[in-house]
Image (cartoon, rainbow, N blue to C red):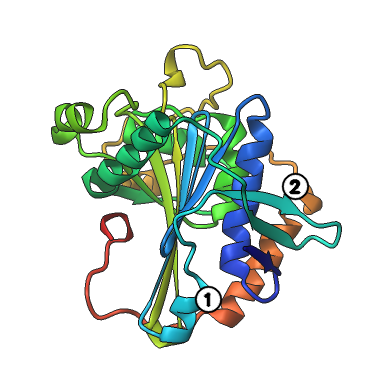
């Protein structure tokens, strides 16, 4: 089983796979666990995890994005296309695969949305830290920019003990960045979610965290808008964002601007 994904034909799926490729590249010492589960595609690699969830009321679309229950390998062709191919076997022991599935199961419905961040915001990392009290590395800026305009989720504080009991040894102080798009007038919903710090909390050892002088310590994200914060000098490198800008343009052409009538929470799907 092989899939060839072109950026101009499936921009949202291509974006997910480019994020998966970046996660794998950042963690070359670790073997990624990449597998399908019907309409979902999962990745776990070191301290990161990611999910691609394709939900459609249209039979044809649903048939196009059934991943089965098999392991995958990801590669990129010289022309930039992504190739997703069935692997010969899972790259981990059965016990670890069970633990991975357990994490995704419980992190999904126990997470709550905290706020949203803007692509290209030079202060997005310290804002995430300030609002969530969770640590995230400056090195993850590239992943956040690839996602675009994610909603930030974290484990509900009241469910930490429950999560530890049900999910096992996974870090309850993870963060999740989630983006969603709709196609075909809302008949098709595609969600991608990236989890950070699923194994351990790097807060104690992190030395690269961006600092930001605040007039006051806000309790919610909206208060940042009223602050008098000196903007940093940001060196803009066109090449760094060229791919993301191309994907944004493709998504604008692809997505039908029609909202679902119900209050759909992608993290609880």
Closest to the observer, 82 or 195: 82
Residue 240 in the image: x percent, y percent? 75, 49
Residue 88 in the image: x percent, y percent? 62, 46
Dot 2: what SS? loop
Residue 207: name its quadrant. top right
Q: Which mark is residue 236?
A: 2
Classify 105 as above or below 257.
above
Image quarter hosting the C terminus: bottom left
Residue positioned most to the right? 78
Disc 1 residue crowd, few under 14, some 14–19, many 20+, Cα 10 Å = few
First-in-chain label (2 vs 1): 1
Dot 1: what SS? helix
Residue 231 seen in this snapshot = no
Q: Which mark is residue 126?
A: none
Image quarter hosting the N terminus: bottom right
Residue receiving disc 1: 64
Closest to the observer, 164 or 154: 164
Residue 39 in the image: x percent, y percent? 42, 65
Q: Identify the residue at image location x=43%, y=38%.
A: 127
Q: Is residue 116 left or right of residue 148?
A: left
User: Which mark is in front, 2 or 1?
Assistant: 1
Classify 123 as above or below 259.
above
Residue 215 in the image: x percent, y percent? 39, 31
Closest to the observer, 33 or 149: 33
Q: Is residue 67 left or right of residue 112?
A: right
């Amino acid at each position: 089983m092989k899939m060839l994904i072109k950026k101009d034909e499936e921009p949202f799926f291509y974006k997910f796979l480019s994020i998966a490729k970046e996660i794998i590249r950042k963690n070359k010492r670790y073997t990624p666990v990449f597998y399908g589960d019907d309409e979902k595609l999962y990745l776990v690699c070191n301290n990161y995890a990611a999910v691609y969830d394709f939900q459609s009321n249209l039979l044809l679309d649903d048939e196009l994005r059934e991943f089965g229950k098999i392991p995958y390998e990801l590669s990129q062709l010289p022309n930039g296309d992504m190739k997703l191919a069935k692997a010969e076997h899972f790259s981990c022991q059965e016990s670890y695969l069970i633990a991975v599935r357990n994490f995704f199961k419980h992190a999904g419905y126990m997470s709550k949305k905290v706020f949203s961040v803007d692509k290209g915001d030079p202060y997005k990392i310290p804002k995430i830290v300030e609002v969530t009290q969770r640590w995230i590395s400056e090195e993850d800026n590239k992943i956040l920019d690839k996602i675009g305009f994610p909603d930030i989720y974290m484990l509900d504080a009241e469910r930490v003990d429950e999560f530890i009991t049900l999910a096992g040894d996974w870090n309850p102080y993870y963060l999740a960045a989630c983006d969603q798009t709709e196609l075909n007038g809302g008949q098709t919903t595609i969600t991608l979610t990236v989890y950070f710090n699923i194994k351990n909390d790097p807060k104690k050892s992190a030395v690269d965290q961006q600092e930001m002088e605040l007039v006051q310590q806000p309790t919610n994200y909206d208060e940042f808008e009223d602050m008098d914060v000196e903007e940093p000098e940001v060196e803009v490198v066109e090449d760094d964002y060229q791919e993301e800008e191309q994907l944004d343009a493709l998504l604008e052409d692809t997505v039908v601007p029609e909202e679902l009538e119900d209050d759909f929470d992608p993290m609880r799907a």
